[in-house]
Amino acid sequence: MKRLYSAIPVAIILFLAIVLRFWQLGAVPVSPDWDEVSLGYNAYSILKTGRDEYGSFLPLSFRSFDDYKPPLYVYLTVPSVAVFGLSVFAVRLPSALFGVLAVLGTYFLVEILVRHAREDQSETVMGVSPRIAGALPILASLFMAISPWHIQFSRIAFEANIGLTINIWAAYFFIRGLYDRRGLVIGFVLFALAFYAYHSERVFVPTLLVLLCILFKKQLLENKKYVMTASCFGLIVLLPLVPVFLNKNSLMRLQGTSSFREQTQLLSVNIQKLEYDKAHNYVLGQLFDNRRIEYAKTVIRGYLIHFSPKWLFITGDHERHHAPGMGLLYIWELPFILIGIYQLLRVRKPTNLLFLGWFVLAPVAASPTTQLPHAIRTLVFLPSFQVFSAIGVLSMFEYIKNYRPIVKIPFIAALVTMILGMSLYYLHMYFIHMNAEYSQYWQYGYKQAVEYAEAHTDEYTKIVVSTDLEQPYMFFLFFSKYDPQKYLAQGGTVSGGFDEKFNRFNKYEFRKIDWPNEKRDGSVLYIGTPKEIIHGTKLNITNLDGTPAIHITDRE
Amino acid sequence: MSIKIRIILIFIVGLAFGLRFYNVWDNPPALSWDEVSIGYNAYSILKTGRDEHGRFLPIDTFVGYGDYKPPLAIYLTVPFVALFGLNELAVRLPSVIFGTLTVLLTYFLVKELFREKEISPLVIGHWSFDVASIAAAILALSPWHINLSRAGFEATIALFFIVLGTVLCLAARRQERLYWVCWLPFVAAVYTFNSARYFVPFAALGVVVFIGKQVVVHKKIFLGGIILSIVLLLPILPHLFSKEARLRYNEVNIFSDSSIVERANDRRAFDNHSFISAIFDNRRIGYARSFLSHYFDHFTADFLFIKGDGNPKFSTQDVGQLYGVDLPFLLLGVYTMFAYFRPQAWFLIYWLITAIIPAAVARETPHALRILNSLPTWHIFIAFGIVVFLSNVHKKKVYLLCSILLVVLYVGNVSYYLHNYYIHYPRIYSGEWQYGYKQALQYVNANTNKYKKIYLSESIGRAYMYALFYTAYNPEEFQKRNSSYFDAAGFYHVDGFGPFIFGSALPVLDDGSLYIFPPNQVPTGVKIIKTIALLDGSPVLTLFEK
């Protein structure tokens, strides 16, 4: 009976999570971005031929746009594409499913931590009193279910979201494994699997694992044999990835996003200072204006920038990473997150320190990279913020409980109204305004362009698509559902880099448009940016806010 | 106070003064617009009792460039101008002195705040350092406070008054007669700096709540003090609510940002003006978001720990407003103070949070100068964190090791900052300090009889004030001028006085005149006398004749 009672709120939260993640999945955000179409078409290609767009047989690292995507998402998309066909919905489905699983996982993880924390009969359980600690997993998973950050990445095909879900479940099984030894094996296998999910995971997971081992050292040492077996299982799962790690090409991605790559810009002031120091014989200056100090500052900045309240609560970063008028977290969470952290810090038990450590380790992988702060690379922050919020809300509730009803009732009413109101504001912005305002950031217009080109393909000898449109070949493969077998027979993708000069299939040719020197006689169809083709005589596709997106023409 | 504490305090205050005073006449490398204005108005008051606009001893505001400067800093500069003449040292000394005194006051602030609370001090050998002296030392070394104390910014003086007022209010708990005077420094702060005007009510409220019951016990004296300070506020009140004061405010505030309203209207139109859109597509949500966004700008890693304020006048761009090594102790200090001394922690956090509010309604954020009133709360938390950290190390050897490491880290951070401040900062950022007019005008002073007319370009800005300042032009003469006006935006312009004629465009060249213009405006075939370059070598002004 008791189990049933606790199952009801979980069921409600799961239902909410499902609705928020599946409602209009594939239609909001309005169009897939380049990574989504690439994941989708590669899954399609695997399904039909067992090979990716380059012709590699069941690869463990998808070259894609030379960013060498970790493989898990593509393979998860294969069954989805098999069932639903090659569509935006099918590509996003695995992410949405894993999003729901993450909400459930948050419940289980916090629940098992609460259970674990209760064992030593102390006065607080994860920062709240034992009497109400039972509500903690429910609140944490509820906040996860309505989290703008989590909803954002659960509704689009991004590998990071799969990694996040695996982290949560792996941590759950790890802690479960302290009681039930089989759990440990599942935990380690999941941790190993996370390496297949997303680049950041490859830094975050080892650190999280070390954290868990330190926190629960005592129990692990009692079960040495099982820990050894479990780690062996984990290592076996990890083994196939070793060649990928050693491969020079897949390391390119790391270099490509590293903040040290732009050496000249980073160090320009430094070099000038250093020369001045040398000319004037300032010995100390030659130490201080050393480039290593500049590097250290850059990495520290890269780490700290992810704790910026402006980024977290107000603005977010790239438009694809948040809804208009929203940050990544609700602003009402701010005080509760602080209270939650404070409450956890007060008792230094492993169960309390887990999420604090999680929170501190999350931005490590992102800190030496460019374009910071970055909401995807630090998606692994979740669910720590939501757990802190839950603890904060419960502690506040505990505090206010003893006040007279005249204080208590309006306070609680105000809090509930605020949470509800801001959630509705977010949903309003996400479902009503985001498509219209952000369509250009979602690379809108390809679908219409491909449809037009496909319908008129017989009228032209050649169709030239400008590479200024950013990886157009993949959009054309995806939306025309071009047969992967035929594509590979024609050579597949030749160059995935950002100059992608030589890609072509069927009648399509992907290159820069050099307008004055093009044929322009009606035999060739040109598809390009409004900058290249000022006026599309055939079709002008506009973004949903009215700005021009793609122009199509065949003559002047 | 024991002799040892006195020695420590003298050392800290001496260090603070040294860091603020050394070479202050040369670095920052030139006087800014506001500094020359403060300096010349002080000179004008000294010589004639009137400001540059001929107003007799203004006590509400100095019109200045039309920016309506608060009066007190100018009056405080008068004695220094009398002593040292019209030069960099005289203009900057008030800031240096009040900045140094703020360091001393920080000691007493912490003492009063934690009176009757037991915090064991750090003991090193025969010396013991309590939170108060460490807080004073941290403030003495603070790049934020050093930078701003080394130029004639009113903010440093206002901060002194706010800390003084707080110390007096807290001390009044034991010496109730102090309730008479403890609000006077707050009044002085209102007369000193614009941001302080918004912060003072918050600060006063915070102090009253913190003192709590004591106020009720001594309510008569307390009310007496309040009434006294309100009376002293009366002269400035008309100005505070005047059109002129609002003019400058409207220019910088976020609520005049029309894009917020436009976006809200666009969204409403998109939603066909439905009921829901009236709630969610509200401009007030836009304003709230804008406010918070500007507010949170002050809590970024770049501003606090990496680069500091983006304006090179307020930061060297190499260290943050705080040192990197401050960060862990700041976090530890905030957390532990909340855990063990909650009323004090709330008081300081309240101070910190409210001191940032005035800056957040303005468009340029983060702004180190406008939130200077949040000092020294950061430094008290940091000091508290350091004490807590070291007192939790119990093994003697580890304790010694940690102390040495801490000192090494601070020495490293401080010398990194000082190296950049003295070696690279003036060279790279002299242009930001309006460098150039002084050097040009020194030539003018040396050749004063050679030219009938001197055409001075306004390319660097406020040329007339630099001419007044560096030629020490007779204020009485200047007050009689007639070729000046206020433009549509309310800014003050002077076309010329004496031999000087100001303008941006190059006039028709004449014999017997000196022309001072940027190099790109110099016509060919003229006789170039001298080219003045910024300290990084790029030319900024050329002196030439026909």
Image (cartoon, coloured by chain):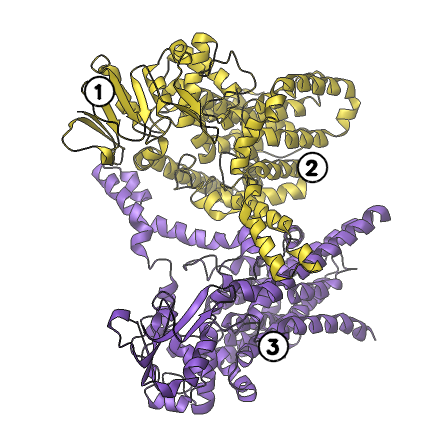
Chain colours: A purple, B yellow
Quarter of the image containing the C terminus of chain B? top left
Element under disc 3: helix
Question: Which of the two marks, 3 or 2, is nearer to us in this view?
Answer: 3
Q: Are marks 2 and 1 in contact (CB under 8 Å)?
A: no
Task: Report the chain holding disc 1.
Answer: B
Disc ID at residue A140: none
The image quarter in which residue A299 lies? bottom left
Residue A29 image position (x, y, % from top left): 55, 70
**Tag 1 secondary structure:** strand
Which three-letter amino acid code belongs to the residue tagged 3? Leu
B537, above or below A307, in the image: above
Residue holding disc 2? B343
Q: Residue, x 57% and y 47% (percent of image)?
A: B290
Of the pair A119 and A551, the residue shown nearer to us: A551
Subunit of label 3? A
Real-space CA distance between mark 3 and mark 1, rounded to the nearest whole angstrom: 81 Å
Amino acid carrying label 1: it is Ser
> What residue is disc 3 on?
A97
